[in-house]
């Protein structure tokens, strides 16, 4: 299951180590997660549903779902998709029982900063780079490395030179991390578990790897927690081998592990189209791409590349069911009529051992909702969203959002919005020379990015967000 050759990526695996899964010795490499190592060893079932005990497998790869919860060294409910494997580690199926032994004592550390940034993806890193020129910045990320979704993107980005057009996402991640680390403090493997208003902004965060609980006091907080994969309703959608598109990219492009040998992709937006090409690069066959809409939703350049590779794209089709004995062995797709109903007799049986769902993202609002910022459902933005102004500040003063948390868009716009949030937050603490000129430049860049056909939806989303924001707060806050 491990990828040995790749046209772009060079998988420099760490030292070979071993851990134990239900008593069986498993080979792994330092620097990879428990779930990735298990997958490479052919272990596809990571958990079971509580009521019916249906088997569940790797899905999102970013710790947002519960499919990978397992018992690790006696501790239940560990998210194995973001927890690094260690030599001699004992991994077991999750029995949902509390451990009998006493939980190790934690250390407590207090941290004060001007600006705390939750999330080290493209938006969070860009906010940190901008703000750290003028303020003391702390970045907190639950993963073991910075970069967010960029660390799995092998394609070259579009847009302007300023946003590193023509550079692969994996390289942009390295550039942003290097810049951010110059002036910022960074907490990795650290999940923020709560926000509290104590007359000042306060975060509680936990590093479960090192057993540290952080009490973080900040003047401003920028939430850049990203988004999570959408699920699609169909028979067998919880079989091991049904993945979120980002989960597949994590397995392949970060850890060098194949999701399977032959798969299908549901969704012909940019993510689905790019994923198809990435699968081919990893030596994995793609049987077809299935799109419910009458036309392809992604950029023509991506669709053309996929079709040149001989991958059929079925528009006005959707998946009817996945089937298999304990894991995906095939799928049935069918044509849709104008009312989105399956047309009887149009079914196609596709033999495959995995299914990728590239059916959109939902903003991860669980933390931002704790702040008291107004949350509103805006379909064009991807779902529930924290209302914010043009400076990315929410209805809760001193609390900002950026990236996919603020609107599901491209990484390029996430980086610009991060810059805006970082600049405004820093200026609110101490006035920055030429602030108006700098912020205007970033806003003009955003406007350019949202022009054209593919900018219609995100632009409409932002218009609704701003309208509802100012209905809530009244007159515009001064910059």
Image: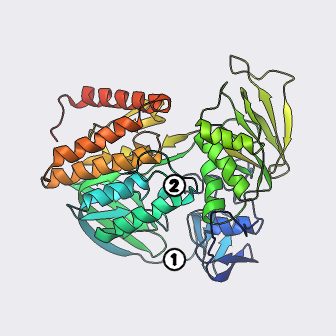
Does residue 242 lie above or below 407 as drawn? Answer: below
**Circle 1 sits in a helix, a strand or a loop, which is it?**
loop
Estimate the x, y position of residue 333 in percent, counting from the top left. 79, 33
Does residue 477 lie above or below 32 as drawn? Answer: above
Number of other residues with Cα within 10 Å of mark 2, as a class: few under 14, some 14 to 19, many 20 or more: many
Estimate the x, y position of residue 294 in percent, counting from the top left. 67, 24
Does residue 384 lie above or below 438 as drawn? Answer: above
Query: Separation of disc 1 and disc 2 at Cα?
Result: 36 Å
Please state if 184 lies on the left or on the right of 360 as rendered.
left
Badge 1 vs badge 2, beta-carbon distance below 8 Å: no
**Circle 2 sits in a helix, a strand or a loop, which is it?**
helix
Estimate the x, y position of residue 40 in percent, counting from the top left. 73, 67
Q: Nearer the viewer, mark 1 or mark 2?
A: 2
Query: Where is mark 2, residue-wise?
Result: 149
Q: In the rendered structure, which disc, 1 or 2, sits on the residue that comes first in sequence?
A: 1
Image quadrant containing the N terminus: bottom right
User: Could you tell me which residue is drawn at 35 percent across and 28 percent down?
Assistant: 463
Give the quadrant of residue 42: bottom right
Query: Where is mark 1, residue-wise?
Result: 102
Number of other residues with Cα within 10 Å of mark 1, as a class: few under 14, some 14 to 19, many 20 or more: few
Compare residues 157 and 411 and report the one nearer the observer: 157
Compare residues 458 and 318 and report the one nearer the observer: 458
User: Could you tell me which residue is drawn at 61 percent across and 74 percent down?
Assistant: 85
Compare residues 172 and 291 and report the one nearer the observer: 172
């Amino acid at each position: 299951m491990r990828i040995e050759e790749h046209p772009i990526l060079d998988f420099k695996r760490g030292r070979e180590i071993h851990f134990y899964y239900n008593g069986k010795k498993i080979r792994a490499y330092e620097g990879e997660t428990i779930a990735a190592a298990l997958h490479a060893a052919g272990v596809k079932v990571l958990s079971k549903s509580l009521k019916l005990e249906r088997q569940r497998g790797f899905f999102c790869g970013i710790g947002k779902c519960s499919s990978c919860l397992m018992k690790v060294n006696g501790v239940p409910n560990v998210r194995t998709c973001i927890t690094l494997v260690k030599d001699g580690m004992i991994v077991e199926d999750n029995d949902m029982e509390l451990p009998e032994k006493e939980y190790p004592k934690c250390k407590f550390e207090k941290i004060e900063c001007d600006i705390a940034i939750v999330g080290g993806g493209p938006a969070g890193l860009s906010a940190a780079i901008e703000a750290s020129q003028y303020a003391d910045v702390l970045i907190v990320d639950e993963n073991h490395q910075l970069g967010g979704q960029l660390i799995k993107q092998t394609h070259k980005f579009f847009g302007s030179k300023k946003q590193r057009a023509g550079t692969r996402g994996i390289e942009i991640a390295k550039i942003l991390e290097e810049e951010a680390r110059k002036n910022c403090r960074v907490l990795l493997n650290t999940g923020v578990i709560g926000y509290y208003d104590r007359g000042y902004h306060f975060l509680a965060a936990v590093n479960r790897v090192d057993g540290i609980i952080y009490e973080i006091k900040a003047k401003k907080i920028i939430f850049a927690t990203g988004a999570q994969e959408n699920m699609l309703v169909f028979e067998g959608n919880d079989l091991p081998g049904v993945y979120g598109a980002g989960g597949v990219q994590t397995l392949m492009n970060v850890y060098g592990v194949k999701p399977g040998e032959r798969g299908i992709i549901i969704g012909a937006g940019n993510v689905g189209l790019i994923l198809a090409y990435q699968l081919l690069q990893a030596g994995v066959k793609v049987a077809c791409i299935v799109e419910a809409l009458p036309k392809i939703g992604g950029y023509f350049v991506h669709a053309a590349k996929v079709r040149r590779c001989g991958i059929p794209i079925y528009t006005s089709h959707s998946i009817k069911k996945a089937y298999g004995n304990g894991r995906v062995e095939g799928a049935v797709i069918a044509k849709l009529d104008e009312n989105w109903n399956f047309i009887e007799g149009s079914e196609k049986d596709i033999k495959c051992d995995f299914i990728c769902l590239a059916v959109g993202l939902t903003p991860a609002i669980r933390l931002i909702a704790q702040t008291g910022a107004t949350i509103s459902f805006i379909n064009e933005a991807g779902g529930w969203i924290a209302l914010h102004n043009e400076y990315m500040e929410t209805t809760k003063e001193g609390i900002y959002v950026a990236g996919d948390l603020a609107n599901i868009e491209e990484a390029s716009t996430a980086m610009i919005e991060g810059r805006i949030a970082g600049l405004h937050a820093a200026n609110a603490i101490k006035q920055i020379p030429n602030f108006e000129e700098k912020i205007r430049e970033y806003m003009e860049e955003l406007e350019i990015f949202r022009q054209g056909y593919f900018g219609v939806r995100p632009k409409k989303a932002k218009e609704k967000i701003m309208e509802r924001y100012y209905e809530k707060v009244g007159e515009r806050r001064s910059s």
